[in-house]
Image (spheres, rainbow, N blue to C red):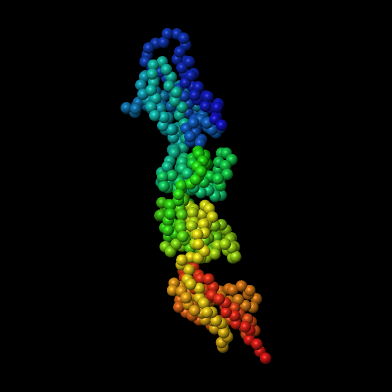
Amino acid sequence: MRNLSLYALLLGAAALAAGCDSSGGVLEVDATGSVAGGVYRDVNGNGIPDSPSDQPFRGVEVRLVSPGSGAVVARATTDTAGVYTIRDVPVGRYRVTLDPARLGDSLQATPLGEVTVVPDSTVQAVVPVSFPRMTVAEARALPVGRRVFVEGLVVAAYGDTAHVTSGGRGIRATRLQSPTSIDLGSLPGDSVRILGTTGRFRGQPILDNATIFVLTSIISLPAPSVLSTTAASAGGGGTLDAVQVQVRNATLTDTVNADGRSFLRLDDGSGPVDVPIGTGVAFANNRFIPGLVVHATGVLVPGTRDGSWWLRPNSSLEVVGEDSPFRPAAPTATTAVRVPGGVRVTWADNSANETEFRIERRGGSVGSPVEIARVGAGVREFVDISTAPNTAYGYQVRACNNKVCSAPSPEAVVPPVVTP
């Protein structure tokens, strides 16, 4: 809602000044006029005194400056209501400025352009004072500790963090709050203005302690930039920080729980990128099966301190295939026979792109196969020496490379030794 009391107070200053200049008598032709108005703190940075939080800016000197010479022609100081009046101003064109010493290093007056003073008339000039407005690229170049406004499009939001982009650059707004009730999860696609303090996280610029103001809602997001998985992991050297991207036809090569986080590892053949999906995810018997081929859309965030980047998804992964093109062919013709000292397992090698074979066994108290050994590429047999004669075992073998494993071979069962 418009802050009507402040709005009326500031805009009414011109009328008051005009009333003082005309008392019903004969006016002297001095070729002068007046400039009147107000100065206020523009909390939401929109240049209009419409926020309930907007407040009069008291005790600041308002100056009329000659555009040609830069000389100060006249001046006045705002009162407790933030109002000023400058009378007996020679006709002409002027710039309205404020005393920079009163604004300090953080605030600035919004430029109004030039005002034209005409005889026996009052020109109205209301001056917003606020934090500087920056493009995303400009905000990223600032030192830590600057309070600024940035406008852009929200491409992702989670927790108290939003990713805002404009002009092909992105920045994260952290510890986000809103002066109104906004569902932060509904922000993607909205055009916003964000007020935040420049900071750093893992070497990348952020806007911390941020307040968000929604400008307009947009139905759909622009198409993401398509990258290879290795380019996503490099993050463009920081130029792609907080930018929405997509990797396509990438194989889910591994699932990882590390440092309290859960990751999917994707690889399109160029190199892996890690995709954080939460904490403490139990990957056993879930839908994240290595070998799936997916499209993944999200924002790039700095990952580990070694310089790698993570692709944080802003939607579910799109499964486009059940079998990776990197998957080796499964071994066949598995056999298992008891030999002195253990069980000899053999298989047929049907792949040309494996780097190793993984032998899995079930038996005894183990109902599901578990990996017991690995052997190199081209090897076709393994002797298991950790067996007991009175136990039946089942063996299967997978061909694996540095991206994904094959399906298991058919199981070969060796019965327990029967003693007379």
Q: Residue furthest right?
A: 420
Quarter of the picture holding the N terminus: top right
Q: Which residue extends farthest top?
A: 26
Q: Indicate the position of residue 97 as horizontal and vertical percent values.
A: 41, 29
Residue furthest out toward the left: 69
The residue lying toward the viewer, choosing from 336 and 238, is: 336
Whether residue 144 appears in this view of the structure is no
Asked if 350 appears above or below 308 in the picture, the reply is: below
Quadrant of res 113: top left
Looking at the image, which is closer to me, 184 or 18? 184
Does residue 414 show up?
A: yes
Which one is nearer the viewer's eye here, 182 or 406? Answer: 406
Quarter containing the C terminus: bottom right
Q: Residue at x 56, y 49 (%)?
A: 159
Total count of labels = 0
Asked if 236 appears above or below 349 in the picture, the reply is above
The one of 133 and 387 positioned closer to us in this rendering: 387
**Residue found 61% across the figure and 72% down from its top:** 368
Taking the image as shown, residue 360 lies to the left or right of residue 89, namely right
Q: Position of residue 138 (x, y in %)?
A: 41, 44
Q: Residue 337 in the image: state x and y as whole percent.
A: 57, 84
The quarter of the picture where residue 340 lies is bottom right
Vertical placement of residue 173 versus 321, above or below: above
Where in the figure is residue 267, as x and y percent of width and height? Answer: 46, 62
Left or right: residue 99 versus residue 55 is: left
Image point 43% across, 60% down: which residue?
230
What residue appears at the point 47 percent right and 44 percent down from the top-left corner? 153
